Image (spheres, grey):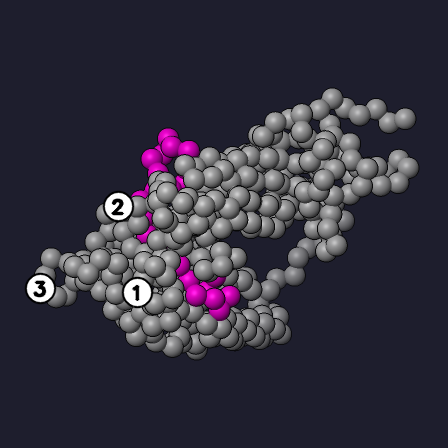
Amino acid sequence: MRKIPDGMIQLTARPVGEDGAPVWNDEIDAATKRLGSVFLAPFMVEVSPGVVIGGYVARAGFDTPVRTYEAKATLIVRNNDELRTTVLVTAPGVRDDRSGAAPWMPYSHEYKASLPKIHLDNMVHTIRGLCEQSHAKELLMRDQSPTEGGPASNSKGVGAVSNWQVEGGGLLLQYKLTRTYDRVPAKHPNDPATTISIRLTLTGASDNNSIDRVLRIHLRPFRAPKETLVMALFTTDQAFGGFVEVHALPVPSNAPRDLLDAVLCVHKDDVTKCLRALSSGGDLIFALMSPAKPDAEPFVELPPKSALTFVLSNDLEFKLRHDHASSLIEKSQDATRARHLREGWYRRRPVIE
């Protein structure tokens, strides 16, 4: 009989759903009761005599004045030593009859990813951060609720929304996609309306067949309170997007007034997260807020004190334009590479005996 190492959880069946993705099930619940509410533990499953697969389960939570968010993660080790991961974040529904505020509906959101094993040691902190961000999203959504002038009243017509404009092409293999939300009404009547311009630049890399994507958000007028801000950009159903840190660059306004424009630079590692939200076609929550102090646990200050919060209308036009521009760049790169091969631009590698 196989001896189970200390601290190892033995399961009788692979913890996967019908789609083959990891899932937290009743057997894991029963096997981890003794570990408490915060833990990271390994598990093993004997799928056939002498053949064992392994993985990890993790659990963490985040307490708020309203309710407690809980994250449960199931990670299965793949053949390439990466971790196929599913994280489920949940929170119970809450009704506060005394304050008269809208009830907090039950919350549930699932994340799926393939992670390098290097992230394992920090997994409890990571999934706790997902709980914090879930609560921050909920607060921003409630701030834009229909009773306070949110999606029901302005999500389909805040200012004038342009179509996605595409510029570029040619020898530089570069395309610029731009959409402008003109004069979005401010949350407070005394504040000026804001023009938001989302600008994505796609450039074909010269040394390989990849595409560099640079995302900038232009705001006019906007005085950035800090150089580093946290930007929320996610769909109203919270399925795509999230919170990212951005670098705010002030741009002097041409008008003779004490107002500034600002350009928000999205880090290259976070561009994909934003593009998924834009490509979804769903309306977007857009907000800017100050990050938490460096020594603080949350990613953003809770409750989030947003300098701007808007609901931006969105559609599938971005995905069509983006995919078409990407396809043109890829075809041009393939043609260029084929021509270089014909002309002998590439040196043959020496044969190593």
Quadrant housing residue 87: top right
Q: Position of residue 145 (x, y in %)?
A: 37, 58
On whether residue 283 falls in the magenta region, the answer is yes
Say which residue appears at 24% left-offset and 61% top-offset: 186
Q: Nearer the viewer, mark 1 or mark 3?
A: 1
| Residue 7 occupies quadrant | top right
Range of the magenta residues? 277-300
Find numbered disc 2 in the image and state the secondary structure of the residue it sits on.
Answer: loop
SS label for mark 1: strand
Image position of 88 (left or right of 15): left
Residue 206 included in the magenta stretch of the image: no
Residue ranking furthest to the front: 97
The numbered mark at residue 337 is none
CB atoms at circles 1 and 2 under 8 Å apart? no
Mark 1: few/some/many CA within 10 Å (<14, 14-19, 20+): many
Q: As drawn, which residue projects farthest toward the left? A: 256
Residue placed under numbered mark 3 in the picture: 256
Residue type marked 1? Ile
Residue assigned mark 1: 196
Q: Earlier in the sequence, mark 1 or mark 2?
A: 1
Spot occupied by residue 286 in the image (x, y as percentages of width and height):
37, 58
Question: 10 Å neighbourhood of mark 3: few (<14), some, or many (≥20)?
Answer: few
N-terminal label among 2 and 3:
2
Quick one: 58 or 228, which is closer to the camera? Answer: 58
Residue type (three-letter) at the residue carrying disc 3: Pro
What amino acid is found at the position of numbered circle 2 in the picture?
Lys
- Read off the residue under disc 2: 226
Residue 339 x/y as whole percent: 58, 75
